[in-house]
Amino acid sequence: MSGGGAGVSGAGCSYQKFVHFALEQTRLRTTLVPHPSQEKFKFIRANEENTVFNALSFSAPKIRLLRSLAIEQKNSVQVLDFAAFSEPEYDLPIFCANAFTSPARSIVVLDLNPLYDTTTNKDYREKYYKNLMPLAHKYSKLLPWGGKITSESLRFFSPVVIWTILEPTETNHHVLYSALTDYYKAWLEVMDEAAQEISKETIERNTEAQHRYLTWRAEKDPGYPLLKKLIGESLAKDLVTEFLFEGVNSLGTKSFLDYFPEYAQADGTVNKKRSMMGKSFETRPWDAHGEFIGYADEG
Ligand code: BLA
């Protein structure tokens, strides 16, 4: 066997295994209750018979939304989109685990996405990422930088991000599973320690930062074309706005173009291109201390 097929089915098991692990770990620390979005999407089915969707969503005292979407196509594509968003009384990073595995390769983004840009906001970087740099150091060696990336995405990444493209082998998926679980445990740790903000301005700022993130992803997520293909345009749209990025229509009133005016076209519509800046960052643009060093490479 060429390894591809075996690796992919192995990956499928691990994504489900990861979801199971993550929920179990979360329940050790807090009480999960089903999120209202579960009702509509729990039993979502694909057009194709060989494709299984698994959608779960919860909330908990500090957690506004914890949701997971796993897609498995027999002997073919395996997808994981797992994220956790805190209540706006906390400025917690957003846990983000995205993996798209085909027989050819796995495209992975794993991060504690910062609520505030860590290049311009040193306090935020110190608060959440200083302690995580050893973890990033370990896994960025095992899961090498995936090469040039949509430049806009960098704004939503932290110095500990794992952006990688892997051959879907057994060994690689073993390392990936270990990274997923270690990063999630790290997120649970900061979640546990997070103190509630009481200042109205701070809570509003956190709300808007989360809304901006949701707005970006609901509009430009690379997974959307595949979702459209699998469940049709209308349901894919609902899945994105009411499940994956739930809150995009309720946490704020600003539009995509309010946040990202560079995408405005002359007729007032949003440019469909994923990126206005193009791709850049051939190599990892942070040093071992989490300092951004990517400017030289830009353009
Ligand atoms: C590709 N997915 C990508 C790429 C990134 C991400 C960076 C590489 C292409 C690029 O440079 O943009 C993921 N980008 C992210 C994430 C953030 C971001 C997580 O900005 C967060 C801020 N991927 C999924 C899901 C599917 C999926 C759920 O997470 C499918 C349902 C598919 N991702 C997918 C596919 C590609 C991809 C098919 C390759 C094709 C392409 O590049 O468009």
Image: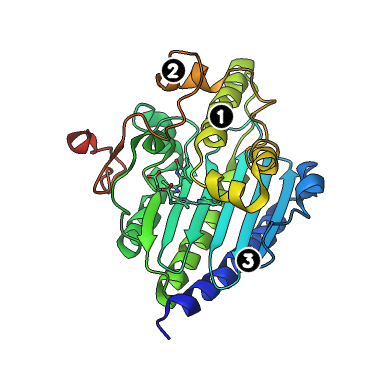
Numbered disc 3: secondary structure: helix
Question: Relative to 77, is 84 above or below?
Answer: above
| Mark 1 Cα-neighbour bin, 10 Å: few <14, some 14–19, many ≥20 | many
Q: Quadrant of the C terminus?
A: top left
Q: Mark 2 points at which residue?
A: 265
* Residue 121 falls left or right of residue 87: left
Amino acid type for the residue under numbered disc 3? Gln
Q: Mark 3 points at which residue?
A: 16
Q: Name the residue under label 1.
A: 215
* Residue 180 falls left or right of residue 231: left
The answer for how far apart the CA atoms under marks 1 and 2 are is 18 Å
Numbered disc 2: secondary structure: loop
| Mark 3 Cα-neighbour bin, 10 Å: few <14, some 14–19, many ≥20 | some
> Residue at the location (63% across, 40% down)?
240
Question: Relative to 139, is 95 above or below?
Answer: above
The answer for how far apart the CA atoms under marks 3 and 1 are is 27 Å
| Mark 2 Cα-neighbour bin, 10 Å: few <14, some 14–19, many ≥20 | few
In primary-sequence order, the first of circles 3 and 1 is 3
The reply to whether discs 3 and 2 touch (Cβ–Cβ < 8 Å) is no
Tell me, yes or no, if residue 171 can be seen here: yes
> Residue at the location (65% across, 38% down)?
237
Badge nearest the viewer, 3 or 2: 2
Numbered disc 1: secondary structure: helix
Image position, residue 136 (x, y; %): 37, 54
- Dividing the picture into quadrants, the one containing residue 138 is bottom left
Question: Relative to 292, is 73 above or below?
Answer: below
Amino acid type for the residue under numbered disc 1? Thr
